[in-house]
Amino acid sequence: MGNRVTARFKGQYRADREAATALTVTGTWDKHLPGRLAQALAWQQGHARTLRLAEEHRALLGPYLPGGVDGFAALDEALANAARIAELAAESNAPGAVADRLGHGAHTDHGYVGLQVQAVRGSLADWCDAVDLRMERWTETSSRLASMFEDARRLKLLPALGGTLDEADRALGVLAADPSGPGEWQTYRRALSVLTDRGLDDLVSRATERGIGADAFPEVVERALLQLWADTLLAADGRLRTERAAELDARVRSFREADRMLVDAASGAVIESCNSRKPKAFGAGGASLIRREAEKKTRHMAVRELLGKAREVVQAVKPCFMMNPLSVSQYLPADYRFDVVIFDEASQVRPGDAVNCVYRGHSLVVAGDEKQLPPTSFFDSTVGDESDEYDEGVPDAFESLLHACKAGAMRELPLRWHYRSRHEDLITFSNRSFYGNGMVTFPGAAERGPDIGVEFFKADGCYDKGRRRDNRREAEAVAQRVLHHFDTRPGRSLGVVALSQAQATAIDECVQQARLARPDLDHCFTEDRLAGFFVKNLESVQGDERDVMIMSLGYGPDERGVLGLNFGPINREGGWRRLNVAVTRARFRVEVVASFHGSQLKDGPNESVQHLKRYLEYAETGPAVLARDTVVADAEPDSPFEESVLAVLRDWGYQVQPQVGVAGYRVDLGLRHPAAQGSFALGIECDGAMYHSSRAARDRDRLRQQVLEDLGWTLHRIWGTDWYRNRPEAERRLKEAVETAVTTDPFARPEAVRLPDGGAPATHVTPAETRSQGPRPEPERILLVDRAPVREWSTRYVLAEVGIDTWAAPEFHTPEARPLLRKVLAQIIEAEGPIHQDLLVQRAREVWGLGKSGRRMVENAQHVLDALVRAGIAECESGFVDVAGRRLRGVRTPLDDQPRRIAHVSPAERQLAMRELALECPGMTTEELLQQARELFGWKRMGSDIRSALESDVRNLLARGELTGAPDRLIATR
């Protein structure tokens, strides 16, 4: 039953489908046809209605009746004209007549109605013309207006201008409300064209998208340009491509290590060079003379004579002489010469005392400080020519060698780094007062403390002006400061300087008296030249330096309380130089002991006394006294880079001081220790102007850091490229360094002790640890034993190993033997050349096993030898044969006590031996040289033939300049 119903429905469906398909244009079925049947029905109904209406109004529409789709446009136009005619003829008293006259196919009438019709038609035509003209103008104007805007804005504006009058009116109202808009727009367009020319036109759109205002736009553009420039530079310069700070730090560490190795290697090269110039043997010449004099007990040769006779050996063993000018004249012969003569402390050397040294050198180096002590005037004559007029016959008078060299226009090399003072206060006064603030000083890591800086101590002393000319109570106060120093700073050296010799003597007596009560401090009072305790006067302290210096004035109020203005050597001309020397001898601390305050001194004309007054005030009140002459503004960061780092550190809550230092080199940022505000926990260095001010990488990356670390600084370097490229990581590394630094105890730093031999500082140990716990062991005795010199220029004589079958070989003298003889001679020459012709024939004869050489044998060998020479295999000169083109291989010593005869040793070999022997023992006599050569070649006695040949060799060497000197002292040139 169900199947029959389904079949019936299927049949009906197929019939309906075929009917629908027949209605389509293509005649094919489409699955969308059922959904479009309603549209087709509506269209059919609308078409039927259109046909019905057209039929009803056929008479009214006449020719305007639409005959197809295209006819509707003409109908719309006719209806619009009719509506307009009705509007214009609304006041006519005969509208029907007007309609008849204006209708399609109406006849012309010259009546009143006709005139109205013509008037209407004329008005309508004029109106249409006016409309067309205005429309044309509006179109042109609106197009011109729209062209002033960019495409995006024009797309929004054109629909409004081309729409209704209301829409156009609103659009024009908006534009009229902004009268300055066109000017701003043109300015914008011009600025945009400039950016476009430089490829930056997208900046404006990107700024608009990100909501950046006009005020901030210039800063954004500048930042973008700078960032682009920086990125381009970093990418183009291979030296800046390293991005990670760890890589930059590793590179600096590698350079420091390489530089230290270079310095060590240089010192090793100097030692090696000196050792290579030492005599290789001591059997003759100057070395033998020195050795003989050293073994004597009495009747020694005068030093001057000994140095004159053994000068070559002496200068080879000790190429550097350290002597004062008086010793040079006393001990060195007048013709003693040096490559370089160096004067130190030249400000204390008179030109007349230096002449005997200057002429001895090929080069001259003069080192000194004209701001320090001049030559002593104790032995100056008071009689002389005091005329100020110029006299060509009178030599120029210079105070010192240093002044004479400066007047001679010698090339000057200023040494501006000040390395001695471990605290800047020790050198600040001299740098400001005497050196024009031109010295490069380095700040210390600690600003204040009991063991650093400059401190003033007031003593209730009285200057004994009439008798002892000293200040006993002040001397006792100095002695107490000496004991206090060794009680609290036993690991640091100490020196005392007084303005007068009388005060120095009084201080020494008081110190000796105070030591009687403190025998436990006796070990501190050593006499070591570099680190021992001393008490000296002002005139003799130049050149000394100690960790701590105590300066005693001695002068002060007398028994009546009157303070005079006589301060001994300070009052002399240039007395400020002596003051400069006295106050710059300390490495860590200066203690000034005086019986009056600096403010008690009156102002006067003596410049040196005024400097003394200011130094006393400086010691008592600190560097603020120097601000009277030079006002220094608060230090500010040196660059925006440093400002950025400073802001980060202060945001973290730390107290930071920019540009730490007084003069010369400054630490960019100093972070104060929270537990000790007088010291710095960390120094931050940015690679800015201070870093780049050094031309040498050694100064930038090793020496400056080495000096600062020696002054107690812990340093952290921030690289500008790392801060720019990877700031978060750079801030993380900075924070780790800061946290590590502030957790350290600022008072737990080990105290460094300078070793007497100039070595590296060592950690201080208590005196108890330095005492020996038992008897000292007997020092090991080392006996020096002479060794035979290693002579690279000599070897043992090597005999040629040649073997032949003597039974099968042709006889030596026959032409048949020549091929074999050619091979034998070539092998002998290769092994033993240069070899004499006679010895060559002897060696060949021994190969054949023959005892004697006959005439024919010699002639046959000579024939073969000539053939070897013509073939370029061998060469023969003065009877000696060698391989062609081969240089002399060296000197050959005898083998198994079988020396060659003098005639069988080539002159070139003998002369090489004698030259090398003269180099081994400089200063030999001719006879010593002959004996040395005889022993070298193994001859037992000096026969007449041997002497004659060797003397001829000496003459040839002298003629060629390979030996110089006289028969009593021969010198080999290198």
Image (cartoon, rainbow, N blue to C red):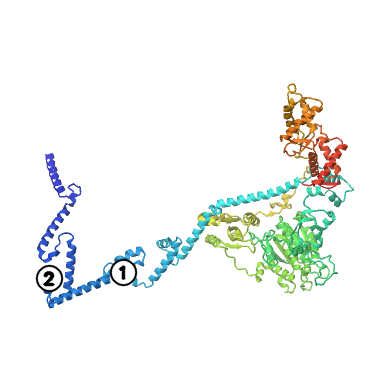
Identify whether 905 is placed above or below 857: below
Residue 106: mark: 2
Identify whether 687 is placed above or below 125: above
Where does the N terminus fall, quadrant-wise?
top left
Identify whether 56 is placed above or below 848: below
Residue 140: mark: 1
Q: Where is residue 744 in the image (x, y as percent from the top left)?
A: 60, 55
- Quarter of image, res 782: top right
- Report crowding for label 1: few under 14, some 14 to 19, many 20 or more residues within 10 A (C-alpha): few
In this view, the residue in front, 422 or 868, is 868
Asked whether residue 136 is in view, the answer is: yes
Would you say 167 lies left or right of 873 here? left
Q: Position of residue 176 (x, y in %)?
A: 34, 72
The residue at the point 73 percent across, 50 percent down is 770
- Mark 1 or mark 2, which has the lower sequence index? 2
Q: Position of residue 93 (x, y in %)?
A: 12, 77
